Structures are given as C-alpha cells and as structure tokens.
Amino acid sequence: MAEGVSHYRPEGHDIIVIGASAGGLQALQRLLSDLPADLPAAVFIVLHIGASSHLAAVLGRTGVLPVLRAESGHPIERGRVYVAVPGVHLLLHDDHILLRRGPRENLARPAIDPLFRSAACAFGARVVGVVLSGSLNDGTAGLRAIKQCGGVAVVQDPADAAVPEMPRSAQRYVDVDYTVPISALGDLLVRLAHEPAGDTPEIPDRIKLETAIAAQELAGMAANDQLGSPSRFTCPECHGTLWEISDGSLLRYRCHVGHALTGEAILAAHAKETEEMLWSLMRAHQERAELARRMADQERSLHRSKLADQMAQRAQEYDEDAEVVRRLLSGRGAAIVADDLGQEVA
C-alpha cells in the first residue's frame, strides 16, 4: 500500500512546493530531470496556465518521478509530483490534496501563493518553498508564509532565470535561505529532503485566515477587517474596495470577495485595462472618421458642398484624435503590459 504523508518522518523536509510562471517550464523540466526516484518527499507544482494544460504529461516525460495531475481528496505520497490543473487552486490539507475554485490571486487561478500558504499551514517546518522564473511577484507572499511557519525558502538565481521578476521579488521581501541556479537546485532539494526539519512555531492567524479564503471556507468584510484596513483603491477584478494587508514591506491587498493582489499585480491589471480602453477609443475615433467621410461623400453627391465640407472637417478631427491615441499605444505602455502579464501555457 502506498505510504501517505501521515507516515513520514515528521522531522523531515518531506513537502516541496514549487511556483513558476513565464520561463518556468524549461526550469521545471531541468529540475525534474535531476530528481531521483527515491526522493523522500512529495513535490507540488503551480505553473501559471491557461484554460487547458498538458503540463503533467510534458513533465512526466522529463524525469523518473511519476508526475500526476492533482486530484481533490487524493492522499499525499512521497516520491510523487503533483501538478496544478486549470481553473482551481491547488491546496494541501492534512494528508490530502484539496482543489478549490477560490478567488483569483495575483490575477491567476491556480496561483502560487495559495499553495504555499496551505502547505505552511498544514506542514510548518517540513515545507520547502521554491520560486522559479516568472513575471510579477506571485509566490512572494506565500514564501514569506513558509518562512514564518519555520520552513525553508529557496529561489532560482535571477541571473539564471529566463524571466527574473518573481525570484527577484522573493529575494527583496523574504529572508531567503538558498539562491541557486536551476542546475544546482535538484541536488539542493535532495539534500534538504534528507535533512531534519526544525520545530514548527505557532501558525499565525493571518496565514490560517488567508488559507481558508482560498479554500472557500471564509470570505467577507469581517474577514478582511482581521487582515488589514480599507484602502482608497478598488479591486481590478470586481471593482470592490481593497483592504491593505500589513505583510512587512510587501504591499498586498484583498477585496471583500477574496481577490488577492500585490501592488505590482494591481499596476499590471490597471495597465492592461488602460490599454484595452485606448484600443477601444482609437477604434471609435477611426469609425467616426470613416462615417464622417461617408456622410461628406453623400452630401457632395447631393450638391450640398457646405455640409460636405463640414463633415470632411469633422473626419479630419477624428483622424487626428485617433492618431493621438495611436501614439500613446505605440509607446512603452503596451510593451510593459505584455511583459507584466506574460504567462506560459503548457
């Protein structure tokens, strides 16, 4: 019979949680190729994905460890790799996996922070958290939670990452234990899996509360009041009030329905929304210009030159307005949005 996590040596680092986004697929393939079949730990992976994913099959061809799509209620077994599936958060609860369609975090579901927090909440010092290549900073808050619960924090060397923003953010806001290139990460995780874990401190109420929100067990203004205080900002997902959460120097926010975002994620969402508005505005100006030209042609065909000239003048003005918007879109804003929201679909 397969050995579940409840039979693990409680002092071992037997829970490894990994988060990645853009550029992370190649890093994960290299990492799994370096992990042995007798790894005395269970591995859980969240990679930002789209509406469909073949990630488990792709990674399953990489190394010797079995790679499975996460299933809710499945018992945790060492020597297995569990991969998040589209549309739901991957969470850990007691000795089994929990999949929940909780509120999106950092514009993603599955997101990295819910997995990291739930692991810290359930397994404390036995957890090793790993942040790999990716944009924005999903995983930073979760890695902070792992450290606060006695676990180990590991990041891919930003100089080694295809997209370095996520590991850089983790370095900035977390007391990271190890920063290594992907070529050295496999050996490090094997060593940590065989090392005794320290004592687990009392789990902070905030981490328990945010884990419950992701599991759809708790949400609302009363819960947010326990996490922080109302801000002047609104949620880019549902446009409700955002509560500002005190988490060291990391600016984090939650709305009353549970959407969670860092300051950087809010900026990225607003940039995307602004770009979409500008494209819509440019299209409207172009359509108005074309319609005014059509009306001018109609007036000329009826020998009403004064009205034709007026409509032609309006068409020119609409063209000029459209050009102003086009210049805004051709600047750095569109490129920044593309970089910030870059996600890799496997």
Image: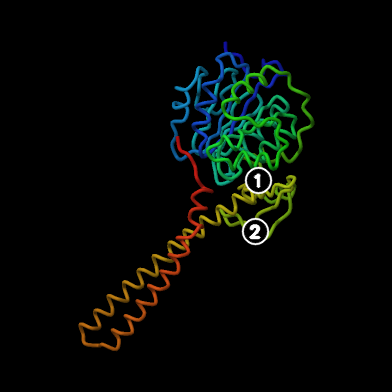
Tell me, for residue 60, which label it has, or none. Answer: none
**Would you place residue 58 above or below residue 114 in this image?**
above
Measuring 63% from the left and 30% from the top, which residue is drawn there? 180
Q: Nearer the viewer, mark 2 or mark 1?
A: 2
Q: Nearer the viewer, residue 210 or 37?
A: 37
Q: Nearer the viewer, residue 75 or 283?
A: 283
Mark 1 belongs to which amino acid?
Ala
Measuring 65% from the left and 49% from the top, which residue is drawn there? 254
Mark 2 belongs to which amino acid?
Phe
The quarter holding residue 119 reads top right
Q: Residue furthest top?
A: 1
Question: What colouring style does the render use?
Answer: rainbow
Image quadrant occupied by the C terminus:
top left
Q: Nearer the viewer, residue 17 or 210?
A: 17
Of mark 2 and mark 1, the one earlier in the sequence is 1
Measuring 51% from the left and 37% from the top, which residue is drawn there? 23
Image quadrant occupied by the N terminus:
top right
Give SS at disc 2.
strand
Callout 2 crowding tier (Cα within 10 Å): few <14, some 14–19, many ≥20: some
Measuring 29% from the left and 89% from the top, which residue is drawn there? 306
Q: Is residue 67 left or right of residue 205?
A: left
* CA distance for labels 2 and 1: 19 Å
* Percent of width and height locating residue 277: 47, 62
Tell me, for residue 233, which label it has, or none. Answer: 2
* Percent of width and height locating residue 196: 73, 18
* Percent of width and height locating residue 152: 70, 29
Q: Is residue 277 left or right of residue 156?
A: left
**Would you place residue 174 above or below residue 320 in this image?**
above
Q: Which residue is mark 1?
A: 219
**Would you place residue 101 above or below residue 220 in this image?**
above
Give SS at disc 1.
loop
